[in-house]
Every structure is written in C-alpha cells, then in structure tokens.
Image (spheres, rainbow, N blue to C red):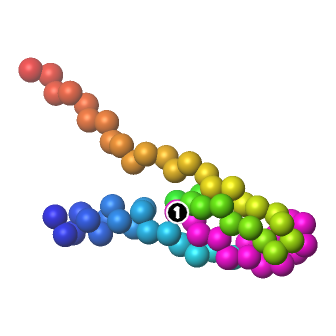
Amino acid sequence: MAILSGCEDKYKTPVPEDRICPVCGKEVEVFTSMGRVISDTACTCGYVWKAEELPTLKVERKEEEA
C-alpha cells in the first residue's frame, strides 16, 4: 500500500504559494492544498486570506449487475 499512499498524500500536503496582497501589493506566503487556501493568513496591512473548504476525494463505485 505504500505506492498508493504516495498518490493520496500528494493531495494532503500543503504547498507554499506566494500571493500579492490586493490592498498594499506586498508578497505574502499562503499555504494551499489543491489550489485552495488551507488556513487563514493575514498580511501586515490587515488583509486576510480566508481558509477555503477542501473537496472530499471520495470515489463512488458503480454496483455490478448480478
């Protein structure tokens, strides 16, 4: 299962991303997962990037006909 763990873990690992503050123009590092901010991050000017809910990675299986 170690091979599958690596595939699933890549979606859980936070990625540091630099974003430009829309208020003051400073570059701020936020942590994202699957392109969404995972924790509230504030700029020194007071602007806050709010954490976004991550989608579930649930796969629905089709039932086989008997």
Task: Report whether 59 appears left or right of 13.
Answer: left
At 26% across and 35% down in the image, what residue appears? 61
Residue 26 drawn at (x, y percent): 83, 78
Report the amino acid beneath label 1: Ser
Residue 43 placement: quadrant? bottom right
Task: Report whether 10 appears left or right of 37.
Answer: left
Q: Outermost residue, left direction?
A: 66
Residue 24 drawn at (x, y percent): 90, 72
Residue 9 placement: quadrant? bottom left
- The reply to whether residue 34 is visible in this rendering is yes
What secondary structure characterizes most of the magenta part?
Answer: strand
State which quarter of the image contains the C terminus: top left
For disc 1, the neighbor class at 10 Å (few under 14, some 14 to 19, many from 20) is some
At 69% across and 56% down in the image, what residue appears? 50
47, 58: nearer the viewer: 47
- The reply to whether residue 35 is visible in this rendering is no
In the depicted structure, whether residue 9 falls above or below residue 55:
below
State which quarter of the image contains the N terminus: bottom left
In the depicted structure, whether residue 35 falls above or below residue 19:
above
Label 1, secondary structure: give it: strand
Which contiguous range is marked in magenta?
Answer: 19-33
Magenta segment includes 13:
no
At 33% across and 42% down in the image, what residue appears? 59
Q: Name the residue under label 1.
A: 33
Q: Outermost residue, top direction?
A: 66
Residue 44 drawn at (x, y percent): 81, 75
Magenta segment includes 23:
yes
Task: Report whether 50 appears left or right of 64.
Answer: right
Count the numbered circles shown.
1
Q: Outermost residue, bottom direction?
A: 27
